[in-house]
Amino acid sequence: MALVQMRQIREGEVPLDGGTAIQDDPDRPAFRGNGPDDYVCVRCGNVLARAMHSVQMTKKVRVRCGRCSTVNVAITNESDQPPRGGSHPGRADA
């Protein structure tokens, strides 16, 4: 399994239809799946999501670390996000 370091949210960064999961117990991940990656807190390295697929860990998924209280998001840079609406390759308005 690969470790993926999440990033801290930026001030005012709130996804329209997302939410923040609270990790109650720092020794138990907030999410558990069956994918290849473990997602860890950017500040303290605590495991926040275990065995997840990248398609599950979008900008809508935020996790408050139970160890250091940092709010993390899985997307580490904006180019990781799929394009939003608007123009598509091959369309006349592109």
Image (tube, grey):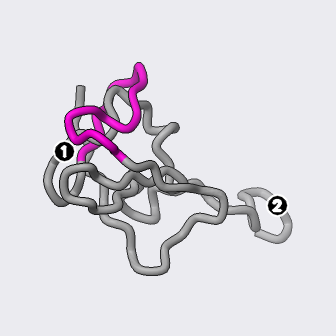
Please, what secondary structure does the residue beneath circle 1 have?
A: loop
Tell me, yes or no, whether the highlighted magenta stretch contains residue 28.
Answer: yes
User: Residue, x 82% and y 61% (percent of image)?
Assistant: 91
Which quarter of the figure has residue 94? Answer: bottom right
Distance between the Cα atoms at labels 2 and 1?
A: 44 Å
User: Residue, x 30% and y 60% (percent of image)?
Assistant: 7
* Residue found at the far top of this picture: 34
* Residue found at the far left of this picture: 44
Kindly identify which numbered label has been placed on residue 90. none
User: Residue, x 51% and y 38% (percent of image)?
Assistant: 55
Q: Which circle, 2 or 1, is nearer the viewer?
A: 1
* Residue found at the far bottom of this picture: 11
Amino acid tagged 1: Asn
Residue 19 image offset from top left, x and y in percent = 55, 55
Tell me, yes or no, whether the highlighted magenta stretch contains residue 16.
Answer: no
Position of 90 relative to 53 (above/below): below
Residue 51 image offset from top left, x and y in percent = 34, 26
Q: Specify the segment rendered in magenta.
A: 23-40
Q: Is residue 7 left or right of residue 20?
A: left
Amino acid tagged 2: Arg
Residue annotated with mark 2: 91
Q: Is residue 14 left or right of residue 8?
A: right
Residue 71 image offset from top left, x and y in percent = 35, 61
Which quarter of the figure has residue 49? Answer: top left
Kindly identify which numbered label has been placed on residue 46. 1
